[in-house]
Image: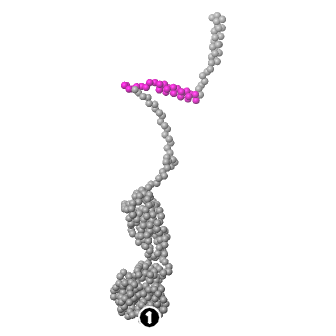
Amino acid sequence: MKPRNRLVVLLLVLLAAALACNLPRRATPSPLEAVNTAAALTLEAQLTLVAQPPVGTPGGTATLVPTLPSPTPPAPTSPSTAAPTSQLTATTSLCDLARFERDVTYPDNSEVTPGQSFIKTWRLLNAGTCTWTSGYTLVFAGGDSMGAPASLPLPGNVAPGQTVDLSVTLTAPQQSGTYKGNFMLRSPANVVFGLGDGSKPFWVQVKVVAASGVVYDFVAKAREASWFSGQGSDPAAPLAYDGADDNPDGAAKVKDGVTLENGATSGKILFTYPKRVENGYVHGVYPAYPVQSGDRFRANLGFLIPSGLESCGAGEVIFQLAYKDGEAIRVLEEWEKSCDGRLPPVEYNLSSLAGRSVQFVLVVRADGASADDWAVWNSVRIQH
């Protein structure tokens, strides 16, 4: 090769080497670039797959259904920390349930007298879901019964949400004190229920208070008594009250403004003349009275002076305080009295009969002959 040609070749080689040194080199990819490159290649491959026509089935057309990744299930929540999706506010309703509205009569601690009859009335609301019918009953549920019946039917239907007044007739005990009786309702299915959760009763509570002073006036009640007369121990025969003074069968009546054996003019007194025979008698059986501890019978006993006479003459009788025991008459105390110008006070402690409802009997017996036995009971009463 000619020198000139070798020079040209050398220059070309050097030029090629210089150009090769100045070209940019491919740098080693970073990890992030490697991940991105791999993802791009994967996406490119998937897109290429989607772009491919689906593989058909013989005689039909295939449909490509993409497969979605399964969602990651949430971490389980413990029962103690799980939040409720809703809050329940309704309570479970009961078929039979009552609600107390008010006392219509005799609120708690109302005062009544011994033996007093009274009607207690409650107003209740049907707070359940079942209608109360006449098959439901008011029942005594314990405490002091005060004569309450074991059960009473309701007066009619009471729908849920309606009210009803329930009444029962009671009798106050004979002794002073506070008394309480409990009541509930009973369904036709024999389910006993009441207030609140159905187990609480409603009640009547009264205070029995004995009256002070004169608690029973025999003069005022003489017309209410049943009067009889007879002789000795013979059975008594009925005697008309307020008959004639000289009735041979005797007399029983209230008089006013008569002259008494001590010369005083009376107020209202009870005049009792025994049957006008030897050892005749007259007696009156009075309406029952509930005796309290501390009650005392009191009276002034004597004779009246008939109009036109100056004295009560030869009157001599036996006054008796008695009471009816079944068909028998039991004498508690007696006082002999003759016409002597005095009306002595008498007294008897009734505490031995306390707690009993007693029919007292006032008796006048002729002590022998019945002449001039114009016997009177003055200021006859029971005091407490």
Residue 218 in percent (x, y) is at: 44, 82
Does any portion of residue 333 appear in the rendered image? no
Q: Nearer the viewer, residue 270 or 126?
A: 270
Residue 383 in percent (x, y) is at: 48, 82
At x 50%, y 41%, the residue is 74
Residue 34 in percent (x, y) is at: 56, 28
User: Can residue 47 be found in the magenta stretch?
Assistant: yes
User: Can residue 295 be found in the magenta stretch?
Assistant: no
Q: Residue furthest top?
A: 2
Q: Nearer the viewer, residue 69 or 218?
A: 218
The amino acid beneath tag 1 is: Leu
Q: Is residue 277 above or below residue 83?
A: below
**Dot 1 lies on which element?**
loop
Segment tinted magenta in the rendering: 32-60
Which quadrant holds the N terminus? top right
Task: Say how many tags the image has.
Answer: 1
* Residue with the mark numbered 1: 309
- The colour scheme applied to this rendered structure is one colour
